[in-house]
């Protein structure tokens, strides 16, 4: 009888384990959004030129509907950003995929994100890198994102509430950095926290913004202007820096 009870307990435990794994993967027969997510990847992301199979797989796996407010769930896989409260947004899926692809992650990286928002971009990164450190300046959003990520089983994402302008020095250097709110210049402390050989992608600008890819090479910084975008502005310390302190986009590469 005791053996039978033990067997039942084991089957129950295994059942719970399987359910968590399915939730973590964001896929499985019980996911009513799987088809919508596959269509999103085909029609909005692959069709626009994102090719990295790992990025496409991550976008197909992460349950975006879990990161948007319940009243917007029906639009979770639409080709647009969505409000997440406190005047902030979750970025358009294509932009999340595009920025992620630019980082060229292979699975072994330590990544810093500034602008946690809903936690969705962090979850996509968590599928593709070893550890993700993400900073959110609005406490309510940071707390909510941390809860969502925990509920979905993302153990390799670490959320900090605060101003990300100065990065996360205790965890630096990072193999890759992504900023998902727009500063009007590239924050110097974040350049310092990027490893040699590392890549940073961020929107830069005010009314007109574009994505800039910064690569730190042995010879200095390489900056490539990519596509026009529209992000919410970076807030906090960024505004305190006078123009003279700002990184000159046209400066010659700096010797490390
Ligand atoms: N990556 C997010 C996602 O997947 O939902 C979307 C980010 S939303 C476009 C930009 C976020 O950056 C907002 O939540 C905003 O509060 C945050 N933010 C703005 N300035 C910041 C700063 N200095 N440090 C940290 N977060 C900041």
Image (spheres, helix red, strand yellow):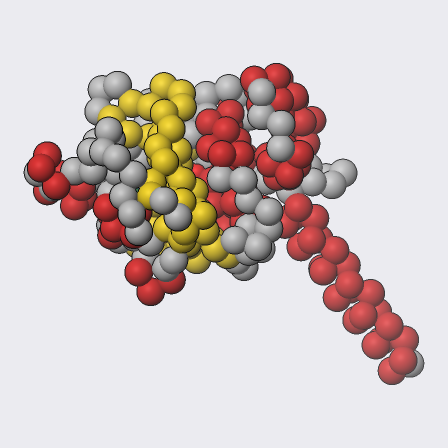
Q: Is residue 238 left or right of residue 80?
A: left
Residue at figure coordinates x 60%, y 47% from the top left: 106
Indicate the position of residue 228 as horizontal and vertical percent values.
36, 19
Residue at figure coordinates x 58%, y 20% from the top left: 49
| Residue 43 in the image: above or below residue 33 | above
Residue at figure coordinates x 62%, y 27% from the top left: 51
Numbered label tally: 0
Q: Is residue 9 left or right of residue 72?
A: right
Q: Is residue 249 left or right of residue 177?
A: left
Residue 122 visible in image: yes
250 or 125, nearer to the observer? 250
Residue at figure coordinates x 87%, y 82% from the top left: 2
Q: Quadrant of the N terminus?
A: bottom right
Q: Residue furthest bottom?
A: 2
Q: Quadrant of residue 39?
A: top right
Q: Is residue 124 left or right of residue 118?
A: right
201 or 91, nearer to the observer? 201
Q: Quadrant of residue 154?
A: bottom right
Residue 152 visible in image: no
Indicate the position of residue 247 as horizontal and vertical percent values.
20, 38
Indicate the position of residue 61 as horizontal and vertical percent values.
64, 39
Q: Point out the quarter of the image occupied by ligand 1.
A: top left
33 or 53, nearer to the observer? 53
């Amino acid at each position: 009888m005791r053996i039978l009870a033990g067997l039942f307990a084991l089957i129950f435990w295994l059942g719970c384990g399987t359910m968590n794994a399915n939730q973590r993967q964001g896929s499985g027969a019980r996911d009513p959004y799987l088809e919508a997510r596959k269509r999103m990847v085909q029609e909005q992301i692959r069709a626009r030129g994102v090719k990295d199979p790992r990025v496409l797989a991550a976008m197909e796996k992460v349950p975006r509907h879990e990161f948007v407010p319940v009243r917007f769930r029906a639009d979770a896989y639409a080709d647009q950003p969505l409000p997440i409260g406190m005047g902030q947004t979750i970025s358009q899926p294509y932009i999340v995929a595009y920025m992620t692809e630019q980082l060229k992650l292979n699975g072994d990286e330590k990544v810093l994100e500034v602008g946690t928002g809903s936690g969705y971009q962090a979850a996509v990164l968590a599928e593709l890198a070893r550890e993700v450190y993400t900073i959110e300046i609005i406490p309510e959003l940071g707390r909510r994102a941390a809860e969502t990520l925990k509920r979905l089983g993302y153990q390799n994402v670490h959320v900090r509430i605060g101003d990300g302008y100065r990065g996360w020095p205790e965890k630096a250097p990072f193999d890759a950095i992504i900023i998902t709110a727009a500063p009007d210049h590239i924050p110097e402390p974040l350049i310092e926290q990027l490893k040699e050989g590392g890549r940073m992608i961020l929107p830069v600008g005010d009314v007109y913004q574009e994505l800039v890819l910064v690569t730190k090479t042995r010879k200095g910084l390489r900056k490539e202007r990519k596509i026009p975008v529209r992000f919410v502005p970076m807030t906090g310390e960024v505004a305190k820096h006078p123009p003279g302190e700002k990184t000159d986009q046209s400066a010659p590469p700096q010797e490390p």
